[in-house]
Image (spheres, rainbow, N blue to C red):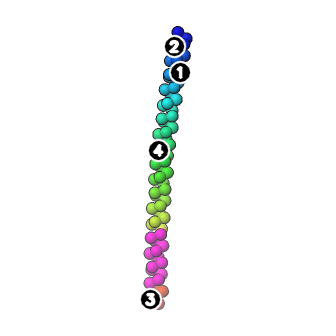
Amino acid sequence: MIKEEIEEEIKEETKEKEEIEEEIKEEKIKEEKRSKEEIKEIEEEIEEDEKEIQRKNKYRKNIKRDK
């Protein structure tokens, strides 16, 4: 009887452990996705900034040329 109770308790704890591990895994995946999205946003901002800089430089060159 005691052996069966212990075995059942071990099964339950093992199941709980597996559920916790799965939750941790899912959270890691979510965090990775968030990180990738943040990186993508930053890259897009950099690209926009570079385009703006190029546009301003072109404008400055045109002004110098026209003088």
Q: Earlier in the sequence, mark 2 or mark 3?
A: 2
CA separation in Å, label 1 and label 4: 30 Å
Label 3 sits on a secondary structure element that is helix
Task: Classify mark 4: residues with Cα within 10 Å, few (<14), some (14-19) or many (20+).
Answer: few
Callout 4, which amino acid? Lys
Task: Classify mark 2: residues with Cα within 10 Å, few (<14), some (14-19) or many (20+).
Answer: few
Q: Position of residue 56 (x, y in %)?
A: 47, 76
Which-is-in-front pick, marks 2 and 4?
A: 2
> Residue at (46%, 53%) from the top-left corner?
37
Which-is-in-front pick, marks 4 and 3?
A: 4
* Residue that badge 1 annotates: 10
> Residue at (48%, 68%) from the top-left corner?
49
Q: Position of residue 32 (x, y in %)?
A: 49, 47
> Residue at (51%, 32%) from the top-left corner?
20
Is residue 53 part of the magenta span, yes or no?
yes
* Residue that badge 3 annotates: 66
Callout 3, which amino acid? Asp
Mark sitting on residue 30: 4
Q: Earlier in the sequence, mark 2 or mark 1?
A: 2
Q: Earlier in the sequence, mark 4 or mark 3?
A: 4
Callout 1, which amino acid? Ile
Q: Which residues are magenta?
A: 50-62
CA separation in Å, label 2 and label 1: 10 Å
Callout 2, which amino acid? Glu
Task: Classify mark 3: residues with Cα within 10 Å, few (<14), some (14-19) or many (20+).
Answer: few
Label 1 sits on a secondary structure element that is helix
